Image (cartoon, coloured by chain):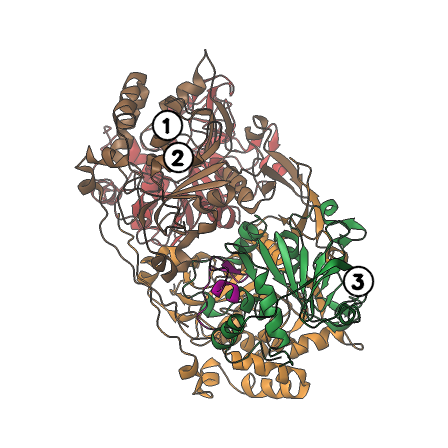
Chain colours: A brown, B orange, C green, D red
Amino acid sequence: MSKVLPMRDAIATYVNDGDTVMIEGFTHLICFAAGHEIIRQGRKDLTLCRLTPDVVYDQMIAAGCARKLIFSWAGNPGAGSLHAFRRAVERVQGERLEIDEYSHFGMVVRIAAGAAHVPFGILRNYMGTDLPNVSSNIRRITCPFTGEQLAAVPALEPDVTIVHAQRADAKGNTQIWGLTGVQKEAAFAAKRVIVVVEQVVDEVIIRSDPNRTIIPGMIVDAVVAEPWGAHPSYVQGYYDRDNDFYLAWEGISRDPGRLQAYLDEWVFGVPDRKTYMARQPDLTDRLRSTSAVCEGVNYGY
Amino acid sequence: MSKVLPMRDAIATYVNDGDTVMIEGFTHLICFAAGHEIIRQGRKDLTLCRLTPDVVYDQMIAAGCARKLIFSWAGNPGAGSLHAFRRAVERVQGERLEIDEYSHFGMVVRIAAGAAHVPFGILRNYMGTDLPNVSSNIRRITCPFTGEQLAAVPALEPDVTIVHAQRADAKGNTQIWGLTGVQKEAAFAAKRVIVVVEQVVDEVIIRSDPNRTIIPGMIVDAVVAEPWGAHPSYVQGYYDRDNDFYLAWEGISRDPGRLQAYLDEWVFGVPDRKTYMARQPDLTDRLRSTSAVCEGVNYGY
Amino acid sequence: MGTDGYTPSELMTVMAARELRDGEVVFVGIGLPNLACNLARATHAPGLTLIYESGAVGATPSRLPVSIGDPCLVTGALMVVSIADVFQYFLQNGLIEVGFLGGAQIDQYGNINTTTIGSYSHPTVRLPGSGGAAEIATHAHRTLVMSRLSKRAFPATVDFHTSPGHRYQGRSRAELGMPGAGPVKVITDKALLAANTTTGELELDAVYPNVKPDEVQQQVGWELEVRNPLNQTEPPTSDELRILRDILDPNKIYLEA
Amino acid sequence: MGTDGYTPSELMTVMAARELRDGEVVFVGIGLPNLACNLARATHAPGLTLIYESGAVGATPSRLPVSIGDPCLVTGALMVVSIADVFQYFLQNGLIEVGFLGGAQIDQYGNINTTTIGSYSHPTVRLPGSGGAAEIATHAHRTLVMSRLSKRAFPATVDFHTSPGHRYQGRSRAELGMPGAGPVKVITDKALLAANTTTGELELDAVYPNVKPDEVQQQVGWELEVRNPLNQTEPPTSDELRILRDILDPNKIYLEA
C-alpha cells in the first residue's frame, strides 16, 4: 500500500480550508514546494504554525491563505523582515492577521505535548517577560512535590503537519539527518502528516539503518517525492541554502507589487516544482552539495 | 583534556557510599563491568535506580551495595526471578531492601524530568491501579487549560549515571546505535556521568556522523574503555546477548551459597574485566557479532 | 503434548494470533505473544506492525527473540526509538491498537496483578512489578491477556491491582478516564474469556475443542457467566502448527508444554 | 572604517570575544556573536564549545554561517540534537554558561525588547519576537548583549519586555526565581555597560579608546551611573583584527560597518 502521491493530490486531499497547518523546518528542510502548492490551490483561513515562520509563510500570508499565525520568531534571518507578515500585523485599517505568540521554548513544549497527547506541557520560563500578559495560553502551574511555580502551555495538535526530509519509503518511514528541528514532534502531534522527500527509497534502505528513522510510516498519510522541494531552504547532503534568495526577499516582500509579481511568476506561473526548477537551470549546479559521506555502522548481532 | 580513566579509578573517583546510582540499559548496553567494580570496591548504602534492574543489580544487592531500589520491573526476563532481590524484599526477619516502584512510563517520565531539570513530569496514567496507594511519589495534577486530571511524578536526578555505549571520544562525546533505551535522559539527569565504551575513537569519527551522538562530552566526567564490558548483556554490532548466562542465573541466584561462590569467582576473584574475559576464552567466538554494516549518509552542503 | 496433537502453548498461540487483524499496530511481548504476532504475520495478517517496548518498531526478527530487547529485533527494523518515545509518542499518543499482557493473577474484572502475592508491604511472593503493563492496559485500544487457567491465577479479586481492568473501587474505565478498552479478551489454555461491555466482568465467550464449560468454571474463582450461544473455537490448522513448529520456534523454547 | 583603523563592528566583536573564558559552553547567535566566539576560539579560548539554537553542538564552521541553521554548522559538529533537547536538556538543564542576545531596545535594567515598538496590539513596528531570547536570558549562567548605542535603542523602559533583565515590575531575578544571572554586560560600539549586582541597573563599566563618558550618556535614556574607577579597554590587537578580516569574515558580511 504505497502512500506516494503527487504534491497536487497530497495537498488537495489532506489540507482543507480552515485547517491548522504546520510546515516545520528550522532553517533546514522547509518545504517551500508544499507552501506554493497550498497557495496555488487557494486554501483560505489557515492557522499557520511554526517556530520560525520565514519566507514561505510570508508568501502564504501575502497570498491570503492565513487567518492566524502561531509562532515564536518571525523574521528573515540575516536579511531583514517578513514584510507581508508585518503589513498584516501592523495595518491600521482592515483586518489584522491574528497572532498567538511564544518563545521558541514555549512552542517546542506545546508541540511536544501534542506529540505525547497530554493537554499541556511545562517549562521554567516567562518570569519577567510580558509574553504571559498578551497570551491566555501561558499560565502558571504549581509542582505538586516542591511547590515551585512553573509555566504551562497547552498542547498544539495541528490538523496537518508537512515535513520535508531526505528520504522515505513508500509507506512513509522517514529518515532525516543534519538538523532535525522539531520535525519528529510536529509529525507525532498532527492528525494528518504529509512527508515530502528528496528521494523515495526502497524499504530495505530504511531498514538497514533504523536509528535514522524519525517518523514511522504508521502516522504518515502521504509521501511526496519532490526533489529540490525545499529550495530556497536546504537539505543536508543534497543542496545548500540559497542565501541569495533570502537576501533578495527583503526587497521583494517590502514592495507589495513586486511580491505579487513574484507569486505570479514563481507560484501561480508554474504548475509544479519541476517547472519551477526547470526555469532556473543554474540553481542545481550552484547549490548541489559537496560530498562528506560518513562511514556506516554495524547492526549485526 | 582526556577524560579516559581505568574503570577502577572512574568508580573510585565518581561513585561514593550513599549515592543514588543509575546503571541504565534496556536489555542492550547494561554495564556489568561497572557493577562488578562497584562491588569490588565495597560501595554501600547505594540507592540503585533503573527501569529494569536485572542480573547486575541482583548481584549488587546480594553483595550488600544497595539500601534502596527505584525501579519498574525487577525480573530476569524469560529466565525467572532475581532471587537476591526477592530475598531482600520478602525477608521476614532483618531489614528489608527499601523499594520505590513505578511502571516503566512513570520511571521514564521521572528521568526525563530530571534531564530537563524541572521538578516533575506528567503522564496520563495510574487510574485504576494500586501503584499510587503505595507511593507518595505518584500524585494528581490538574491541567490549567482543560481541567483534566493527570498523574505527576517527581524528577529523578541521580548522583551518578553509568552508561555503556559503542564508542566515545576521549572527551566523552558518545555514540550509540541499536536500542537507545533511556541512556540519553539518564545521562542528562545525573550530576556525574561515567561513559563506558567498547572503543575510544578519535574525535574525527564522532564528528563525521554527529546525528549518532547521544551524550555530549560536556556532561561526561569519565570515559572508560572496556571492551566486552556489557557481557552478559550485549552491544549491537559488537557482541550478542549471552542468553545462556541469564538462564543460568536462575539457578545461581536461587541459592545464596552459589551466588556467593559466583561473586567470589567472577567479581572478587578477578581484578578487572580483562581478566574476567581471559578466564572465558570461548566467549568471544561464541558471541561476537556478525556483520550488517549500513551505508553512510552525506553530511556535505 | 496433549492428546489432541498439540500442546496448550501451541493452542493458546494460535488462538491469540487469530485475534489480530491485518494492518494493526501491536505492542508485542516476548514468548507466546511474540509467536502469536509472527504467526499472524505469516498467515492472515501480513501487514501487522510489531512494536516492542524496548523501542524496535516494525521489527522482523530473523530468529526467535529471547528478550524484549533482543538485538535481532533491531537489525532490519523500520525504526528504533527511545523508551521515552515508545511511551509518550506511540502508546500515550494512541497509536497502539493491540497490547499483550500476562499476569500472575487476573480477576473477575480483568484487573491484573504482577506485583505481589500477599500484602504489598509483607509479600509472600514478590513479582517483577508493572513494567509497561499498567500503561498498556490503560492506553492500547484493546488488550489481550494470555494466561493458563488455574484457581490461583484467576481469583475473584487480585491481591494487587497492577494493571487496570474494567472496574476499580467500583468505578468503570470511562469514569476513571482511561482511553483504551482494556483487557477485552483473555486467552487461556481451555477457553476464551471476554469482558462484558456493560458490567466489565469476564465471561466465558468460547471453549476450545473438547472442553466443557464446567472445566473452565472449576479453575476460575468467581461464578462465570456463560454466553449464550457459547462459541466453539476451531482447532489449530496443520498450517498454523507447521509455521509455529518448523519456522517460529523450532527448538520448542516456548511451545514445549 | 573609523579613524582608529577598525570599524565599530570589529571593535564590538573583539570586545565580546574577550568576555569569553576558555572552556565555556556558549549559546551562539549569528553575525557578530558568531564572529566573537570564533575569534575567541582562535585566540585565548580554544576550548569553547559552541552550541547553536538550531541544534548543532560543538560546531566548527568551515565557512561563515549566514543563518542559525547553516549546514556548515552540522558538518563536522560533535552532536546534532532536536530543538526540544536544546531547550530542555541543555539550556533549562543549566549547561549553557554564556548566551548572546541583541535587541531593538535595551533598558535601564537590561530588559530587552524584540517584539513590538509601540503597543503590542497596535504596533508601530512589528519585530520578530522572542525566538529563544526569553529563555536564554532566563537560564544562561550569564548573558552578553551586543547593541550599538542610540537613544532609540537604550530607552529608560522597553516598550515590551521580551527577555528578562534584572528587574520586572519591581521584582528582582531572585524574587522571580530565575536561574541565570541575566544580561550582566552590554557590549556597545563605544563602551561596556555592566549590571549593578545589587540594583540591577546597567552602569558604565568601561569606555573604549578615545571615548568620553558623556558621549555614552548622550545616547542612553537614563542617568548612567559611572563606575569609579572607570575602566579603559585596550584597543583591538593587530592579531585580533587579522583573524577577523582574513579568516572569519573575509567578505565583510558582518564587519563592514
Tell me which secondary structure the magenta stretch mostly adopts: loop
**How crowded is the residue under tag 2: few (<14 C-alpha within 10 Å), some, or many (20+)?**
many
Regarding mark 1 in the picture, which secondary structure is present there?
A: loop
Regarding mark 2 in the picture, which secondary structure is present there?
A: helix
The kind of residue tagged 1 is Gln
Q: Nearer the viewer, residue B252 or D128?
A: B252
Q: Which residue is mark 2?
A: A11
Q: Is residue C207 magenta?
A: no
Residues under numbered marks 1 and 2 in contact, where contact means CB atoms less than 8 Å apart: yes
Q: Is residue C47 magenta?
A: yes
Q: Residue D99, image x and y in percent?
A: 44, 42
Q: Nearer the viewer, residue A281 or B301?
A: A281
- Please give the name of the residue rendered at 49% of the width and 64% of the height, measured from the top-left corner: C43
Q: Magenta stretch: give its range.
A: C39-64
Q: Which residue is mark 1?
A: A41
In this image, D213 relative to B152: left or right? left
The residue lying furthest to the top in this view is A93
Q: Residue A11, image x and y in percent?
A: 39, 35
Q: Which residue is mark 3?
A: C224
